[in-house]
Image: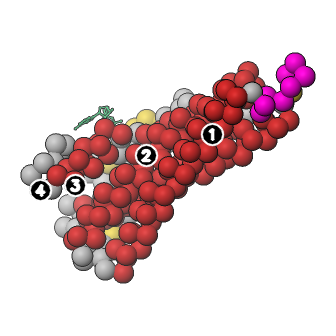
Amino acid sequence: MSAFVVDSKAEGFSVAMHLDEKIGLFTSDTAMLELNRCKVPRENLVGQVGKGLYVAYSALLNGRIGIGSGCVGIIEDCLNSVVERAKTRTQHGKLIGKHQLVQRHIANIAMNFEAARWPTYRAAAEKKRLDATPDDLAVRNKVDLQSAIAKRVASRLAYESADLAVQVFGGFGYSLLSPVARHLCDSRVARIYEGTDEIMELKIASLVLGNGFEAYS
Ligand SMILES: Cc1cc2nc3c(=O)[nH]c(=O)nc-3n(C[C@H](O)[C@H](O)[C@H](O)COP(=O)(O)OP(=O)(O)OC[C@H]3O[C@@H](n4cnc5c(N)ncnc54)[C@H](O)[C@@H]3O)c2cc1C
């Protein structure tokens, strides 16, 4: 298997289906692509012949750390948004931030922020180590594990935090005019693409258990 850059104007390339009705990520175009006897010139080869899977795996390692980082950003913005809302929104003569149950939501988002960012930093640090020693299999496995953990943890916590933030915003939180509603829609897909929650869990377990325990194909 080899990796190539394919020109979208190449013969045999088509967009099989446009995913127009997504529930989030409105600024990003998503489509299913079809390659039917598509010819690509030799110079479009990425990496070495027969090493395409290596290119794909490398992209996934970076991608998972990127998604983890994006999710940390979502949690941080949820936190900033609810703090601002809690300090400015008054109901029945009292700031909503003075209610203990609203404070619990804020405390949970603050904890999620810490819980999501440290595994993400750790994965990024391990990846930096791998970039310096690309042939070290032990380091590669470590990055594989840490990036799966970072993505799995941060994406779940981002979705949970966005849900809590919507709660703090009340009815306005249910409108796409509020930033937190957009975070709720956008963060959900982070649990699906670049490896679903389930695949991340199987990957983490197999890397912890060692060779021979891969429960996914
Ligand atoms: C907005 C968006 C953008 C995307 N961008 C890209 C992109 O840029 N490039 C790209 O290549 N793909 C992209 N994808 C595709 C995405 O990576 C896949 O949707 C994702 O990997 C899940 O595959 P699937 O949709 O075929 O689900 P399925 O494989 O049908 O999975 C359905 C369910 O079954 C579970 N499941 C499947 N197999 C197993 C197993 N072996 N063990 C346990 N559980 C399993 C899954 O975890 C999931 O819960 C994008 C998807 C979306 C929604």
Query: Disc 1 marks which amino acid?
Result: Ala
Q: Which residue, as the protein is rendered here, is positioned at the far right?
A: 93
Q: From the viewer's side, name the closer residue of 108 and 67.
A: 108
> What is the secondary structure assignment of the residue under circle 3?
helix
Distance from disc 2 to disc 4, alpha carbons, whole Å, reads: 24 Å
- Disc 4 target residue: 211
Q: Residue at x 48, y 58 (%)?
A: 118
Give above or below for 103 relative to 34. above
Q: Nearer the viewer, residue 119 or 13?
A: 119
Q: CA distance from mark 2 to mark 1?
A: 18 Å
Amino acid type of the residue that numbered disc 4 sits on in the rendered structure: Asn
Numbered tag placed on residue 207 in the rendering: 3
Task: Identify the amino acid type marked 3.
Answer: Leu
Q: Are marks 3 and 2 in contact (CB under 8 Å)?
A: no
Mark sitting earlier along the chain (3/2): 2
Judge whether 120 appears above or below 50 on screen: above
- Magenta-colored stretch includes residue 96: yes
Lateral position of residue 208 relative to residue 38, left or right: left
Residue 180 falls left or right of residue 185: right
